Image: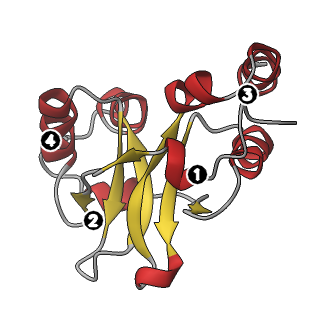
């Protein structure tokens, strides 16, 4: 697989990703998603390290549909296994990881800067930076 150029994750990621705190409620997360116009947020702890990801779908399926009150459920309660990639990894590595784990968003960690969240790689980032054939392959593998 090849990107359009020899790019790293740092080159294509969306920078400045905002986290919802692991102790904030799903109500808070939903409002942040609305205000930021995003469908997912990283969950960070008080140590500013990544603890998980939460999506709008998680809130609906794992909270609201279960009859739970989103103002009473902490974002950290829905944190699942974390898949991430280093800022200096290649775009090909990010694409492979997203396909392997079947995720549409991949948090980017700067391990050289204290293992802090640096951004997120999304489908949109990939679409702008890899060939059409690779995007088609990605969509087939992640959505199948």
* Among numbered discs 2 and 1, the one appearing first in the sequence: 1
Residue 107 is left or right of residue 56, and the answer is: right
User: Residue placed farthest to the front in the image?
Assistant: 5
Residue 140 is left or right of residue 65, and the answer is: right
Instruction: Give above or below for 71 relative to 74.
Output: above
Q: Mark 2 points at which residue?
A: 22
Q: Nearer the viewer, mark 4 or mark 3?
A: 3
Q: Where is residue 82 in the image (x, y as percent from the top left)?
A: 56, 61
Q: Give me the C-alpha separation between circle 2 and circle 3.
A: 27 Å
Q: Give me the C-alpha separation between circle 2 and circle 4.
A: 12 Å
Residue in front for this viewpoint, 120 or 29: 120
Q: How crowded is mark 2: few (under 14 residues within 10 Å), some or many (20 or more)?
A: many
| x 58%, y 60%: residue | 84
Q: Mark 4 points at which residue?
A: 27
Q: Nearer the viewer, mark 2 or mark 1?
A: 1
Q: How crowded is mark 1: few (under 14 residues within 10 Å), some or many (20 or more)?
A: many
The tag on residue 142 is 3
Residue in front for this viewpoint, 76 or 103: 103
Instruction: Give above or below for 120 relative to 50.
Output: above
**Does dot 1 land on a helix, a strand or a loop?**
helix
Q: Mark 1 points at which residue?
A: 9
Q: Where is residue 34 in the image (x, y as percent from the top left)?
A: 17, 27
């Amino acid at each position: 697989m090849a990107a359009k150029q020899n790019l790293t994750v740092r080159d294509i990621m969306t920078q400045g990703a905002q986290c919802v705190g692991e102790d904030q409620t799903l109500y808070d997360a939903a409002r942040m998603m609305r205000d930021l116009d995003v469908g997912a947020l990283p969950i960070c702890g008080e140590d500013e390290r990544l603890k998980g990801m939460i999506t709008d779908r998680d809130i609906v399926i794992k909270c609201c549909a279960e009859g739970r009150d989103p103002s009473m459920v902490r974002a950290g309660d829905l944190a699942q296994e974390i898949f991430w990639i280093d800022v200096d990894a290649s775009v090909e590595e990010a694409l492979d990881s997203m396909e392997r784990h079947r995720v549409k968003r991949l948090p980017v960690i700067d391990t050289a800067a204290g293992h802090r969240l640096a951004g997120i790689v999304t489908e949109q980032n990939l679409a702008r930076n890899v060939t059409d054939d690779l995007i088609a392959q990605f969509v087939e593998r992640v959505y199948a």
